[in-house]
Amino acid sequence: MDRCDVIDVLEESVTLRRAVTVELKGGGRFVDQARDVVTAGHEEFVRFRDHDQVAVRDISFCAPAEPHEPSYASKT
C-alpha cells in the first residue's frame, strides 16, 4: 500500500469518525479512530484517539475496520 493510499484511508477515518485497522511495518496491529493527519518536519503523522501518534511511513497497511454501510441519507 503506498503512502498516498494510507493517507486517504486515514483522512477518511478523520472525516467520517470511523475506526481503521492499522498494521505497522514493525509487526504491530491495532484498531483505532484517526483524529488528525498532520505534517511536521516534512513528514506526515497520524494522531489516534487511543494510541500514540504514528509516522505514516511506519504504516504498512490500513483499511476501514468495518465495511461502509450503504445509505440513502445524502440522496434525500
Image (spheres, rainbow, N blue to C red):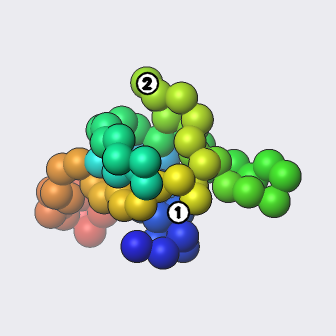
Q: Amino acid at mark 2?
A: Asp
Q: Can you name the residue that lies furthest to the right here?
A: 41
The residue that appears at 18% across and 50% down in the rendered structure is: 66
Above or below, 71 against 66 in this view is below
Q: In terms of sequence position, does the residue under pointer 1 or pointer 2 come before the other?
A: 1
Q: Amino acid at mark 1?
A: Ile
Secondary structure beneath dot 2 equals loop
Q: Work out whether residue 15 or residue 10 is closer to the camera in this orientation and state it.
A: 10
Above or below, 34 against 67 in this view is above
Quarter of the view holding residue 29: top left
Asked if residue 48 can be seen in this view, the reply is yes
| Circles 1 and 2 in contact, beta carbons < 8 Å | no
Residue ID for mark 1: 7
In this rendering, position of residue 35 left or right of residue 66: right
Residue ID for mark 2: 50
| Quadrant housing the N terminus | bottom left
The residue that appears at 36% across and 61% down in the rendered structure is: 61
Asked if residue 22 can be seen in this view, the reply is no
